[in-house]
Image (spheres, rainbow, N blue to C red):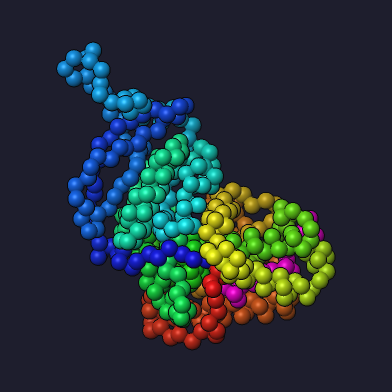
Amino acid sequence: MAMLELSPSSSSHAIKASTFHSSKLSYVPSRISHQRRLNVRPPPRTRHAKVFCSVTSKEVQAPVAVPTEDPKKKSECYGVFCLTYDLKAEEETSSWKKLINVSVSGAAGMISNHLLFKLAAGEVFGPDQPIALKLLGSERSREALEGVAMELEDSLYPLLREVSIGIDPYDVFRDAEWALLIGAKPRGPGMERAALLDINGQIFAEQGKALNAVASRNVKVIVVGNPCNTNALICLKNAPNIPAKNFHALTRLDENRAKCQLALKAGVFYDKVSNVTIWGNHSTTQVPDFLNAKINGLPVKEVIKDTKWLEEEFTEKVQKRGGALIQKWGRSSAASTAVSIVDAIKSLVTPTPEGDWFSTGVYTNGNPYGIAEDIVFSMPCRSNGDGDYELVKDVIFDDYLWSRIKTTEAELLAEKKCVAHLTGEGIAVCDLPGDTMLPGEM
């Protein structure tokens, strides 16, 4: 999947931001209280200015209109912007939950363009969860970030209480409770996978340091920028004060694609497909597991008896679905990636249905399967809905599945050696077992 370029120039010690000043006017939309800002003409922007677009912190009290001169004289304002209200008192009587801080990198990219509006609308954390969006971009995407913030403002989401934008992760990640790391450089023509690992690895090392310094100690991190498994490993290694268990690499889109293909073959709707696991790396070595998957509660191999199709066509379709989509449409799978990020978060904040599980790339230390430790590997998980998870123990393996798992494990171990200089483990040695493509690459 193609990703927004996020320039490494966003390093905190390379960038110091100044803040625009804006006047504040408040209003009361129909049935909700929601304060916003109108920006007046700002002073000339410095090269590394940080811009705050929108709105209301729960700590901000709306201004109270004070009559000047003749109290009978009509004030010079328009419509709802003439109205004021006591934000603090209104919040105290609200049934909404405490504000949640969500930071998103690559926020001006196509994936975020789909994702942010789902977050703001309450589709992810629920219809009673107010949210603050903190959007991270690069120097060259700053104008686009302002446009994103303007669209979010114009959408009048009642749950969206704050929007801030910036190019310094040390500012944008402050107090983050969720960090969705989407921004990364795409793999260009002729670029070796090792080069991509190094370029993007530097970005995620810096973001890991920023999270370690300023984010909530229990922040949940979902890494989307490719190569996402190893980027997640780099990020967690640079954030020693945050539990390694809190870092995830997105493999939910691969799981969704596997469910789609199984449903098509079996002639059922996709909600009849359960217990699908993606094992390993988010690359073409990933292993869509049909051995443990079920259709209508029955093992897939009892419903789809064509073993050759399962081992060959099904597996390859899932592994290469992103590339096939690009060939058909000429663009990457931004919308379905955004949906899969929503699914990944919801799987952590809502209880997993009894007997089912979901796939996510997580740290392997202590895993019950015999997979090598100290890498980020996609495995089957369950959640109680508290943002945490546990690995599923009741899975089975056969020779076919295990041999495929060992192949993707070898690739991740080789990638780990490639980025040793970014994880504090010595000098990098790159000897990748094959230059496998990422799902979605040409």
Query: Is 352 one of the magenta-colored residues?
Result: no
Which residue is at a point 52% across and 79% down the rendered structure image?
413
Task: Report whether 196 appears left or right of 326.
Answer: left
Task: Report whether 441 appears left or right of 9.
Answer: right
Query: Is 286 one of the magenta-colored residues?
Result: yes
Q: Is residue 274 above or below residue 70?
A: below
Q: Is residue 77 above or below residue 265?
A: above
Which residue is at a point 69% across and 56% down the rendered structure image?
356
Of the pair 73 and 89, the residue shown nearer to us: 73
Q: Residue furthest top?
A: 72
Percent x, y of residue 44: 19, 50
Location of residue 75 (image quadrant): top left
Q: Is residue 218 visible?
A: no
Q: Which region of the structure is painted magenta? A: 283-298
Which residue is at a point 56% across and 54% down the rendered structure image?
339
Count of numbered tags: 0
Of the pair 120 and 176, the residue shown nearer to us: 120
Percent x, y of residue 388: 54, 55
Percent x, y of residue 49: 24, 54
Q: Is residue 358 visible?
A: yes
Percent x, y of residue 132: 40, 45
Majority SS type along the magenta span: loop
Of the pair 335 and 375, the residue shown nearer to us: 335
Which residue is at a point 25% across and 65% down the rendered structure image?
14
